[in-house]
Amino acid sequence: MKRALCLLLAWLTLAGALIVCPGAYAEDLGPWEDAEYSAPVDEIPEEIEISLDEDAAEETAIPVDGAAYPEDAMILAEPLDAEAAAPEETAILAPEVDAGPVVLSVSKKATKSVNLGTTYQIEVPGKTVQSYKSSSKKIATVSKAGLVTPKKPGKVKITIKLSRKKSFVLTLKVVDPTVPVSVTIDQGKAAAICVEETLALRATVSPATAKQSVTWKSADKKIATVDKDGNVLALKAGKVKITATTPNKKKATLTLTVQRVPYLPRMPYMVSHAMGGIGGMDYSNCLEAFLENYAEGHRVFEVDFEYTSDGKIVLCHNWKRKLFEAHKPYSKTSYKAFMSSKIYGKYTPLDIDGLLLLMRDYPDVIICTDNKYTNQPTIKKQFTTLVKRARALNVESVLNRFHVEIYNKKMIETVKQVYPFKSYCYTLYKTFKKAPTKAQLENILSFCANNGIRMVSMPVEWWKASYMESYNKYGLEAGIYTTNDREKALQLIEQGVTAICTDYLPPIEG
């Protein structure tokens, strides 16, 4: 029974089957070409060997032997399963596109760079080339048709013969595109930061296909250290070379100048009041004023902190001044309204974040704060916000360059509880209503000397040359605000004043 079933299946399969002939029969089948085999069941040769897997889902090849078929013929049979017998969708895969060799078009002696892993086709426009010859097959081979295959890095000459007497040489520099050719430090060849500040150095390796890894090294770890990712920490004042080296010893060097903290010189210097004047206008605290006065040579800037109506700190002298469009008086406003307005109708306002990022980008800048408030909880809140924003922006190290103004004896402890700033100035305009007596001044000077406050400042109208004796007695510096009179500034410097706040005067050397 089983044999009869197999024979029946074979017959049903053979009806209309395609005869496939391998070998020589594929070329000349004679009368069997394009033939179909059709016969009654009782005429099927007994020699046919049927091999059907009842569970198969694929075609099964049945070898055929006998005089009725060419030798080695195969009859393809399919199982009679309805689903398996149904035509299958065949995914047609797009052939891979071979970009082919890169064309090297030359007509005379030349030198070109080529990469390992890429083939190149030499073309000589308008000329018939008789032959190509490589001076070193170990570096690059060239076929009779001018196909160049780089083998290893090096220099090779390809002689291109045009005729019996005419030829020229194409010099090829074979390079490994994964091997660095050069490296540069993104920050350039020089940078400056202050002690305890950080600087994130980054290196770029050429070509772009090369591995971008470098090893960082500091020539003097006592001045500055650098970690494996290029992050520099300044430790003490001085100059140090920071080097980035690729695995194949390509190098780039940056000279880092580390300045002491704070960078307030112990010599006469000018302080740009409220970022300095701009366009004949003062008290702006704006970005353009900073940039203009920095370009003029100023490095110490005084800024004013104020709260907006929704509790954000911005740089604003006060809300009563005519700072905004049409110079109209402006009442306390929201942060969004302030930041979207233009100071004096054309200048860019700044907030705490903008100030901190400027200090990051200008590492030789010192900021003197005027935060306006004497209430201790408000003072604590202001400086806590300043520190939090610096940490959030990853620029905490710039806090070392703040020269914090103190208004009373309680304030120094409040500020120090928030953050250990490096430099303080006690300003007298919140303590006294008029010029202090010698005794009053020395009381403040003594307090400052005992609490790490290096400077005491006062309005220019209060200053007396005789005060300098008391300053010298306690080893403190004198600061004066504000004058735009050059002769007055020179007089103050001659009397021993260290810092002079100004809107418009350029830097003056004592």
Image (cartoon, grey):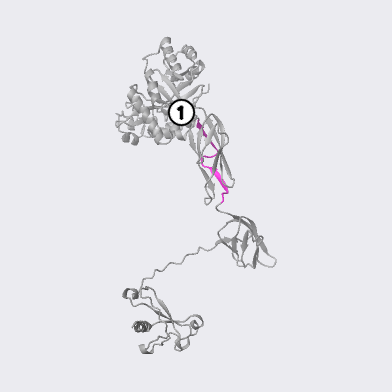
The one nearer the camera, 180 or 2, is: 2
Please identify the quarter of the rendering in which residue 79 is found: bottom left
Question: How far across and how far down the image is residue 209, in percent?
Answer: 52, 52
The one nearer the camera, 76 or 326, is: 76
Q: Is residue 509 left or right of residue 481?
A: right
The one nearer the camera, 37 or 184, is: 37
Helix, strand, or loop for circle 1? helix
Which residue is rendered at x = 62% and y = 60% of the image?
Answer: 140
Q: Residue furthest front?
A: 1
Q: Is residue 75 left or right of residue 248?
A: left
**Looking at the image, residue 448 lies above or below residue 42:** above
Q: Is residue 126 left or right of residue 15?
A: right
Please identify the quarter of the rendering in which residue 434 is found: top left
Which segment did they paint magenta?
Answer: 179-194
**Looking at the image, residue 106 lies above or below residue 477:** below
Answer yes or no: is residue 347 visible: no
Q: Which residue is under mark 1?
A: 401
